[in-house]
Image: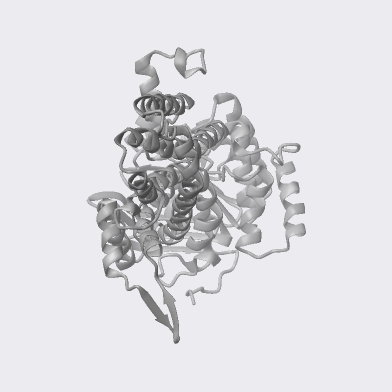
Amino acid sequence: MTATQAWTTDQPIVRIADVYKAFGAVDVLNGVSLNVMKGEVICIIGPSGSGKSTLLRCINALVPINKGSIQVEGQEVHDPKLDKLELRKKVGMVFQQYNLFPHKTAVQNVMMAPITVLKQDKTEVEARAYALLKKVRLEGKEHSYPGELSGGQQQRVAIARSLAMNPDVMLFDEVTAALDPETVKEVLVTIRELAEEGMTCLLVTHEMGFAREVADHMYFTDRGVIVEQGPPKEFFANPKDPRTQEFLGQIL
Amino acid sequence: MSGTDLPVLLPAAQRLTERARREREVGGPIPRLQARHGVWLAVILIFSAGAAGAQAGAEQESVLSIMLKWTPLLLKGFVFNLAISFLAMVGGTIVGALLGIWQISLLPPVRAGSWLVTQFFRNAPWLVLLFFCMFLLPFQVEVFGLVIPLPDWIKATFGLALPVMANVSEIVRGAIQSIPSGQWESSESLAFNRRQTLWQIIMPQCIKRMLPPWMNLYAILTMATVLASVVGVSEVMTLTGQVLSAEGGRTDLLVPFYSYILLWFFIYCYPIARWTVHLERHFAVKT
């Protein structure tokens, strides 16, 4: 069994301590530490190749870490005997490229994991899937295939698909980066609603305006380390590190 | 794309690029058998039969009636070809699909072993494999005291099933690896295990990619069944040879008879080729 320590809500739901990761000779993460409390929304920004996406993938064990420790609700993610099913029930993830299952309709995409993995009752899951699609404003699109939906609609199906597993933490990996400008907003609205409902969210994003508005805490990464962090107001108003200043100067 | 869907109207270079792209997509050559190929065969048959008829004296039987006389026998042989092709395809597909899945196994020995078997049988000449099976397999096997005879045609089926198996293995492996890695990643993040991901997410998407090359392989196999004549199975080629010698080895009958057989193969393979092209188009539009 996985080493799961007693976890209470006054402790960080995600605890990342001194994590190192290298792909071959390329160091991607060089000692990253951060904590996320339940219901908190954190945004990670930084230049491409700074290890943002890798960090998210480490949290749900898609990428194994070389050194350090990651805990989600007290469950040790770096444990070699990790119960991956248990971890992934708790952590949902949405990708830049949506990665919907193209051979299944929107509602089937949402229903698949709870039925196959959690062995839940089909009629109960179906009702929940319809409710989730309604929640992400895709009423009437339940029986469309991913190929028939716009990027923004696909991404919202992907969010609903993750939510169907009833996760406690959601990871968003540059979810709007592949979208047309006009559909970015509909996805961001969905994420903001989730955040307002108290979902713990970790976002990697390039949408600075959105980050400023929705985040409780900002992180700036560069070359595999966290260079600067702080509440968004302060973080955007007067960044202290020259690298953060330069990056924000280029983007804003 | 230009404004036309008709391949004929596209300039040659563009047509070739388009074809290369589609062949890359299905992972192998796409059969381009066309109705006019059959017309050519029929023309050759009629002309050669006419020529043979003109050469023959008035006292001799006409070419047409000779061919009609032997048609039932030759058809029996042809059915035998189809039976061999069918059985070899079924067997080769079942074992080949397993091999193909093993080629992406996470266990290194399984992966290496199935890779080796696949490469060996895929790159060995079909005729050599056929001879191997003819001479290495016993004429009967005993299972739990039950004696099962292994006639030549069964051995030939084994021999042809081996290269089919290796090719199916490569088709399956290629199709699985052509699915974007994001599909594996998102399934994994939804807590699917590897087996569930493979069977519920990856394989259903592979089927349509595998179908055209698989049907193509079947057409190739059907035409390869005549190799069995070399090892003495009484299929259509063997029978044609026997019929020709029964007719006194008349050289003017060679071309009509062999083009007659060729025409049968065309009639059998043409619909398969058309259907393959149709399926390929159908799937190309959907994704």
Q: Nearer the viewer, residue A227 or B115?
A: B115
- Is residue A198 among what the camera can see? no
- Is residue A83 among what the camera can see? yes
| Percent coordinates x, y for residue B88 in the rendering | 43, 57
Above or below for B122 versus A221:
below
| Percent coordinates x, y for residue B270 in the rendering | 49, 35
Q: Nearer the viewer, residue B208 or A55?
A: B208
Above or below for B13 versus B193:
above
Q: At 47% across and 58% down in the image, what residue appears? A: B87
In the rendered picture of this protein, how many numbered marks are placed on residues? 0
Q: Nearer the viewer, residue B270 or B233?
A: B233
Quarter holding the C terminus of chain A?
top left
Query: Most extreme residue toward the bottom, as rendered?
Result: B145
Above or below for B280 versus B37:
below
Q: Nearer the viewer, residue B9 or A186?
A: B9
Q: Quadrant of residue B100?
A: bottom left
| Percent coordinates x, y for residue A220 in the rendering | 41, 42
Q: Quadrant of residue B134?
A: bottom left
What colouring does the structure picture have?
Answer: one colour
- Is residue B264 rendered to the left or right of residue B132? right
Query: Most extreme residue toward the front, as rendered?
Result: B59
| Percent coordinates x, y for residue B118 in the rendering | 31, 57
Q: At 40% across and 65% down in the image, what residue appears? A: A78
